[in-house]
Amino acid sequence: MPPPADFTRRRVAVAGGFATQGLVFIALSTRLPAIQHRFHIGPGEFSALLLALVAAAGAGSLTAEQLAPRRGSATALRVGFTLMLLALPVVGFSHRLWLLAIGMALYGWALGMVDATTNMQGVTLEHAVGRPIMPTFHAAWTLGGILGTLLALALTHVSLGVAALVLALLPLAAIFLPYLRASGPFEAEPPTDLGPAGVEVPWRRILVVGAALVLFYMVDTAVTTWGPTYLDRTFGAPGGLVAVATLPYLVASLIGRGSGDRLAARFGATPLLRVGACLGAVGLAIVVLAPSSYVAMGGFVVLGVGVAVVAPLSFSAAASIAHEGSGLDPAAERARVDAVIARFNQFNYLGAVLGSVMTGAVGKDSLRYGFALPMVLILGIVPLARAFGRDAGSRGTTTGSQRAVEGAPRP
């Protein structure tokens, strides 16, 4: 664990990993229509390709679950960024569908590894400092997504191959960031069933928190996937407005997550999530009933502010639950939490698939109906918020892993 002098440097490094992932993901996502056009991929084939990408990401998260407890999450994160570095040029310069499929699968695998390990790094540092800081890490992801949107606009007239090479510079740089190192020797083998030394992980409580994460990503994916189409089909919005349809949502999420550390520390996770879920439902109601595209985008803003902290506080809560009562030595406890976070990350992809598929299916005649579905479902977070406890980010500071923190900084 980092000594006090290293805290800021490590925190900036972890935030840089989140930002790199967000930037590359959003920038590449904006190029998907161009990829679809280049290969003349129909809607059905394109949906299958995206589902394969999500499946590969799930496999990447499972790979991180095996690698991180053995070699540390920093090593697993660097492996993920290396795979991303290799995948982007393959995607950009592919001229055959089978080669594109390989590149997308490799990128998905890398995405899953980076997804899981950035959150491992984040919850470890949060546990050491003893106060909520995960919201600002996810704010770094959102900031990266905003920069990725702007970069994609700047590279609009650049070939896909050149754009991929530019994007590949980011994971290359991220490989060399000073991430958190292991606090001690790791086990020769990963924890057995995530419960070494006979310690059982309280999965029932973690599954409740995971359900909230699923609901968030259902809503988040519905907005990012179908928001532009909603403005186009329902209101006939101009092309320029459609292109930046989700930008207000991202900016609002950045604001919500940027203030999430202080709000979570002051009010606790449970009331913050309940208020946020209600605010999110109001935002989606504005979207559903909007008389114009600008009002709908205003609804996305309200939604973004409301639900922004659900994902980071979910990872914080899962890590805190995994820490509780383990009684393990620091290295084994960190390995256990890393493995739990990797498995917990799978809820991300389940929510993403459900959000994109269900919104499209319900809204095939009118996307107003499609967005009405997440408007109702997001309220499910209200009863689930009880599982988070008051201090999702700092609850674990009195557990055994505190012994691994040598002079950890205090709030």
Image: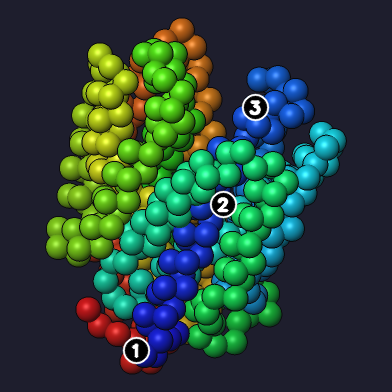
User: Closest to the observer: 378 or 366?
Assistant: 366
Position of 257 relative to 125 (above/below): above
Residue drawn at x 77%, y 28% is: 39
Distance, label 3 to label 1, CA atoms, is: 48 Å
What residue is disc 3 on? 47
Determine crowd level at label 3: few under 14, some 14-19, many 20+ residues with C-alpha closer than 10 A: some
User: Closest to the observer: 37 or 378?
Assistant: 37
**Lower position in the chain sequence, tag 3 or tag 1:** 1
Residue type at mark 2 is: Val
Residue 24's tag is 2
Secondary structure at numbered mark 3: helix
Residue drawn at x 64%, y 67% is: 172
Determine crowd level at label 2: few under 14, some 14-19, many 20+ residues with C-alpha closer than 10 A: many
In the orientation shown, which residue stands out farthest toward the top? 365
Position of 202 relative to 347 (above/below): below
What residue is disc 1 on? 4
Secondary structure at numbered mark 2: helix
Residue type at mark 3 is: Ser
Residue drawn at x 62%, y 30% is: 33
**Lower position in the chain sequence, tag 2 or tag 1:** 1
Determine crowd level at label 1: few under 14, some 14-19, many 20+ residues with C-alpha closer than 10 A: some
Residue drawn at x 40%, y 13% is: 236
Q: Position of residue 298 (x, y in %)?
A: 25, 30
Nearest to viewer (mark 2 / mark 1) = 2
